[in-house]
Amino acid sequence: MHICKVKNYQELSRKAANIIAAQVILKPDSVLGLATGSSPVGTYEQLVQMYENGDLDFSQVTTVNLDEYKGLAGTDPQSYRYFMNSNLFHKINIPHDRTFVPDGTEADSSAACAEYDRKLQETGPADIQILGLGHDGHIGFNEPADHFEVSTHCVDLTEQTIQANKRFFEKEEDVPRQAYTMGIGTIMNSRKILVVVSGKDKASILKSVIEGPVTPHVPGSILQFHQDCTIIADEDALSEINL
């Protein structure tokens, strides 16, 4: 793991965007693995700005997203497809048919996961995969468990994740209890992984991910085994680690 310590969220977002931009410039037909949530929003804002300034061209890029809530259509404002459209896809020149997100409307979990794995197989491994980090150490929606899930699967969200996500919904009961998520095996197959972590509330779990034992009870700890993983974290997030 390479740890990049930055002062604040703004600097984190700039550094992450610069790494992704360099990937796209050097390989215009890159496959980008993307994440949702609050952590990468600033990174996407920076990428949009670079595109608007004429510095980036996404016309040949393919994207694959980590996850989607089961039961939500892409038109639902709380869906991850809607999030990606609003924060990135509709603001750059990427062809819509080259942006892939699990189909939350497919009620048959086995069918939904098999179809997404087929698309992931077609696109090939991500040239760079961006990740956030959950308070319980989850990456994507790979929650703490007794084993690492390899491929796309349907997961029951933990109470901690539901509580963390309820702020995005009108009321707690509206938060979906299940999601489709890319598996740990697929994530680890990415050529490069970029993790963005911000805030004092992530300090304890980030310490476990970086310095603790590799265990499926802290899913992000598996990143210790990746050959090219960079963690960009601000001072607050790294406050429990001596660098």
Image (cartoon, rainbow, N blue to C red):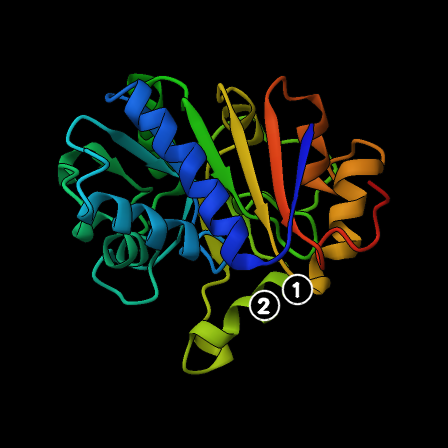
Q: Secondary structure at mark 1?
A: helix
Residue type pointed to by label 1: Gln
Residue 180 or 198: which is nearer the viewer? Answer: 198
Mark 1 highlights which residue? 160
Q: Going by the image, does 149 lie left or right of 54? A: right
- At x 59% / y 21%, what residue is drawn? 228
Placement of 199 over or under 102, stated as above or below: below
Residue 221 position, x and y percent, is: 73, 35
Q: In the rendering, at what x and y percent does residue 135 appear?
A: 67, 57
Q: Is residue 176 left or right of residue 235?
A: left
**Residue for badge 2:** 164
Q: Is residue 154 above or below residue 120?
A: below
Could you tell me the amino acid type at mark 2?
Answer: Ala
Residue located at (66% from left, 62% from top): 199
Task: Give me the C-alpha separation between circle 1 and circle 2.
Answer: 6 Å
Camera-side residue of 183 and 126: 126
Residue drawn at the location 34% of the way across and 55% of the way down: 45
Task: Say if 235 sits above or below 165 in the image.
Answer: above
The x and y percentages for residue 85 are 23, 53
Vertical comparison of 15 with 152: above or below? below
Other-residue count near label 1 (Cα within 10 Å), few / some / many at <14 / 14–19 / ≥20? few
Measured from the top left, where is residue 59 in percent x and y?
Answer: 15, 31
Apparent side of residue 84 relative to residue 234 in the rendered image (left or right): left
The furthest residue to the bottom? 171
